[in-house]
Amino acid sequence: MESPTRFILTEHSAALWRVTFNNPPVNLVDATMTSQLNALFTRAEASDSLAVIIFDSADPDFYLAHYDLSDENELRHVLAHPEEVHPWTALLARLGSLPLATISSIRGRARGAGSEFLLATDIRFASREKAIVGQFEIGMSAIAGGGPASRLPALVGRGRTFEILYGGLDYDGALAEQYGYVNRALPDKELDGFVDEFASRVASFDVQTIRDIKHFVNLVTQRPEAEYKDQMDAFWAAVNRPAQQYVAQHLFEAGLQQRSDVELDLPRWVTRFQYHSGSSVE
Amino acid sequence: MESPTRFILTEHSAALWRVTFNNPPVNLVDATMTSQLNALFTRAEASDSLAVIIFDSADPDFYLAHYDLSDENELRHVLAHPEEVHPWTALLARLGSLPLATISSIRGRARGAGSEFLLATDIRFASREKAIVGQFEIGMSAIAGGGPASRLPALVGRGRTFEILYGGLDYDGALAEQYGYVNRALPDKELDGFVDEFASRVASFDVQTIRDIKHFVNLVTQRPEAEYKDQMDAFWAAVNRPAQQYVAQHLFEAGLQQRSDVELDLPRWVTRFQYHSGSSVE
Amino acid sequence: MESPTRFILTEHSAALWRVTFNNPPVNLVDATMTSQLNALFTRAEASDSLAVIIFDSADPDFYLAHYDLSDENELRHVLAHPEEVHPWTALLARLGSLPLATISSIRGRARGAGSEFLLATDIRFASREKAIVGQFEIGMSAIAGGGPASRLPALVGRGRTFEILYGGLDYDGALAEQYGYVNRALPDKELDGFVDEFASRVASFDVQTIRDIKHFVNLVTQRPEAEYKDQMDAFWAAVNRPAQQYVAQHLFEAGLQQRSDVELDLPRWVTRFQYHSGSSVE
């Protein structure tokens, strides 16, 4: 595996790895990150000893901001190949089925694809003061593509899933814990120590037992794969509509994907640029 | 649509409507309300712009008390037509599948059919001090007919569903929030502002995206329709038994369906009239 | 039914029974307890009047410690008869389908099979200060055999299920309530009164209604039986491996199944004896 550029891999031991997202300026998810994570998962799946991977971030303000929306070829490719499962959908499915325990340690913003990533890990621990999770996509006139309509109900129930997806708002650590969006919210200064202790404990246990647990809990809680493809297709159909293009264009002009107030406070910014009959897309 | 008599319809905009239940003395659900809601849903389903309906109440003590039990012809009709899906069952199914976001804003008592109604909406916000939700039907020797055995598990889990249905107790806003029975409990004086702000936000978003979210979350979380008919049939079978008729008769004599202590404190009153071998039904 | 030796049966009335676990020194679950509970369930299923069974403990420190691991013939029997459903699996399935309401009143430790038992009851009330629940089995290099991978997701969601099973940690009353592992945590001095009042209320209600509720909630929330057999088979496969035998042997030497610090603080003790290549099993 070539050295990854989108994250730092720390192999604490043969049983415990750490992936630290590091893709300035705001930790966007993109095709390169997807590819590098796939290469990492290939190594992880081949290991007989790997028990736990922690996913955290080098940027205290952004865990993973969201998916990179600047790749203009991607929409064209997706529309031309409707039979393909999108690489992001495939990566999240693979993440959910890794034969080991996966833990998100969340500090900073995890919106859109960032939230989708942590929802596909087994366990989520969050900074009470500094974690922000949410699915802002409705603010860009698109359904979230990476499957939160399938994964959130198993964590927060039907009613709170609707609230999260319809509202497109930010959820801080305390509310995310109350809803079950994350397992626990810890005081920020205790988060790293808590996660390290929990992960080290699990990593000291029998790998076959971890695999048995993963197998049976997945059997009970995983959703049919087809649901995920359909949601991703609906996302790209939305990206092909004027309502999405209108808000996206204006957000980019205002600072989207830069280290800007737009990225810090995205759920508020999206309300400025809602498309209505009469809006013009340049 | 003729003017409804059971609720006030306020069309804030083409995207946002409000239904305010207003059926004195205690906001009972009845066949007329069901019919008027069906007419409203027909209009809502035909709209291209409607994004959100808020359901609240004109009575601060009663959101929806429960189903009107005084219609003596209803039992006869139901037993004579076992193949029919009861209009209340059909209305709740239709409510759950409306192509828009539905929000219950709960102040006062929502027991029995009142609770069943809010469980069939997408999102529930409640007054922390003044909301009371519950399924009191076991106190009348009948299973709840409008499907909470199917809808509660997706919100509060299996164990708390059993507690709510076996106990027939009242749940205040704080406990309902802790259980997930409602999304959130807000301080009473903040409830209306919170709901208006949330609903206006959603109503400003793309209607197609709202429909996509509704479609996919329903696909993941809705239960088979047959479950609901079977529960309603079990309810009417109970209404046909002496144990139910005994407690119903005594509760009516004590003030049921009037603005009375019986309606204010129903879970306590039902315990006075439990039928046992030796009880006589007049 | 012969007098049970593993618990005390109190028949408060024809509608309400209490089973008080009493198997010193630490309330282990074993084949004798399973057999005596089966005999009790046979009587319960034959009753027309029984509405509620409360399960509590005579030992304030141990609700049910875990399964008795000292029966050396059991592994041999299980491996020789792979087609059989283990009696513990069958008992928990039967418990979940009793035609009445079952309530766990939890004070002291309920780990492993103790937790599996309370997860198979309908409702769990716990002492805030003195209840401890958890699935420690991973610390003994085995998946939990009695089905928590199937029952926990319906109570605590997918993420917290992974945390509980991977971590093998203790959950106190407050955290168990927050997660939904128990319905409610009550102050210890209020627990008995609360449970008695709730159980007496339910026991005063119509038995047929309780059966209807049990039927429909089970229809919605129960998992396929095959899942449970597969998990139990995976448990015994683990017991047949050196990793499990190594930690078990050392824990027994340190005081397992005695009234010892090992039993009081089991999740900490298991970390001392994890098997690694190089560990020797005597």
Image (cartoon, coloured by chain):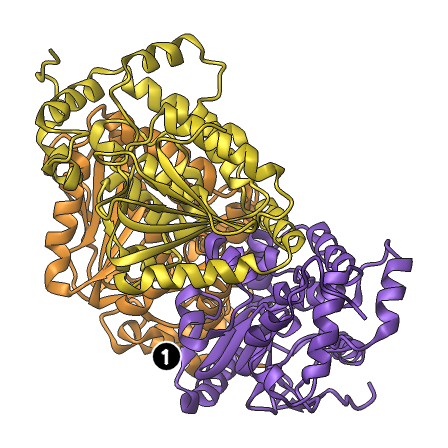
Chain colours: A yellow, B orange, C purple
Q: From the viewer's perspective, is C279 left or right of A56?
A: right
Pinpoint residue A226: horizontal percent, then vertical percent: 52, 28
Give above or below for B110 relative to C110.
above
**Residue A93 seen anywhere in this rendered image of the structure:** yes
Percent from the top left, x then y, of residue B279?
54, 82
Q: Which quarter of the image is occupied by the N terminus of chain B? A: top left
Q: Is residue A62 above or below residue A205?
A: above
How many numbered marks are there? Answer: 1
Where is residue C47, by image quadrant?
Answer: bottom right
| Residue at the image point whose x is 70% and y is 55% from the top | C231
Residue B117 visible, this angle: no
Q: Residues within 10 Å of mark 1 (few under 14, many from 20)?
A: some
Amino acid type at mark 1: Trp
Q: Quadrant of residue C66?
A: bottom right
What percent of the width, then of the height, locates residue B9? 15, 42
Viewer-nearest residue: A50 or B108: A50
Q: Nearer the viewer, residue B151 or B73?
A: B151
Quadrant of residue B18 within the rendered picture: top left
**Residue ranking furthest to the right:** C80
Tell me residue A232's x, y (percent): 40, 25
Which residue does the numbered mark 1 point to in the structure image? B269
Is C18 in front, or is C235?
A: C235
Tag 1 secondary structure: helix
Q: Residue at x 52, y 51 (%)?
A: A13
Residue shown at 86% from the left, 55% from the top:
C82
